[in-house]
Amino acid sequence: MLTKEQIRKIWMGCLVLALTVLFTLTGAGCADQKTSQQPQDNTQQSQDNQSNTTETLDTLVDNNNEKKASESQPEISAEPKETRESVTLYFGDQDAMYLVPETRKVVLGNQKLEEIVIAELIEGPSKSDLFQTVPKEAKLISIEVVDGVAYVNFNQDFQTKHWGGSTGEMMTLYSITNSLAELPEIEQVQFLLEGKKVESILGHAITSEPMSPNWKMVKE
């Protein structure tokens, strides 16, 4: 029969053994948990780093695109710069025998230079000793330049409001032709009335074919 002292030693041994087993199991579980948690932490950190890298690259691409877009866009001013050109216009002299050149500066806007030349001829001379060659009622419908020929299309008033006479007719036709021929891309002028060729718009000169400038009519 066991004595009390022996029973106490056996009980203490069992307790120590039980505690040892318990600590061993607890340590192994913590280690497993730490081991299993560490890859998750590393994976999350890798995903965060990848996300940050992607965001940085996207930001750089966006900034680069914005820079290119700003560089490709021209500066737009609320008040566009005026471009001026010098043109030579021909008006009649006091005796209605010669054409006299008048040089003036014109402002280029949305109009073509050849359109401006016709508009200035209709406006008339600025010098008091020169005379009108194109009726003020005349309106330019269109003007196109093809292979050196300017197709000048007037409305009906170009014909009906003209003052007549063979001399006046020649002054009008060559005033326009010579003025347009001063432009580098124009060599001849084809007159049109309401979009059609007319044998003789003003009654004397043949206008069904392109006209070349007549520099002999210019007063030197």
Image: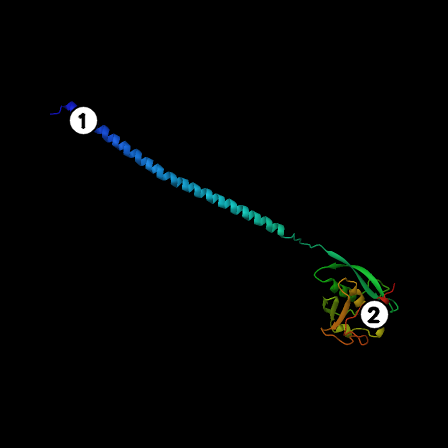
Secondary structure at badge 1 equals helix
* Amino acid type, residue under disc 1 in the picture: Ile
Q: Classify residue 159 as left or right of residue 96.
A: left
Q: Residue 63 location in percent, x, y?
A: 56, 47
Looking at the picture, tell me which residue is in the foreground, 120 or 146. 146
Earlier sequence position, callout 1 versus callout 2: 1
Q: Residue 61 location in percent, x, y?
A: 54, 48
Say above or below: 71 vs 45. below
Q: How crowded is the residue under tag 2: few (<14 C-alpha within 10 Å), some, or many (20+)?
A: many
Q: Residue 17 location in percent, x, y?
A: 23, 29
Scheme of image coloration: rainbow
Looking at the picture, tell me which residue is in the foreground, 129 or 35. 35
Q: Residue 150 location in percent, x, y?
A: 74, 67
Disc 2 target residue: 171
Quadrant location, the C terminus: bottom right
Say above or below: 9 vs 67. above
Nearer to us of marks 1 and 2 is: 1
Q: Classify residue 88 as left or right of residue 70.
A: right
Q: Are marks 1 and 2 in contact (CB under 8 Å)?
A: no
Tell me how many marks there are. Answer: 2
Disc 1 target residue: 10
Quadrant of residue 85 within the rendered picture: bottom right
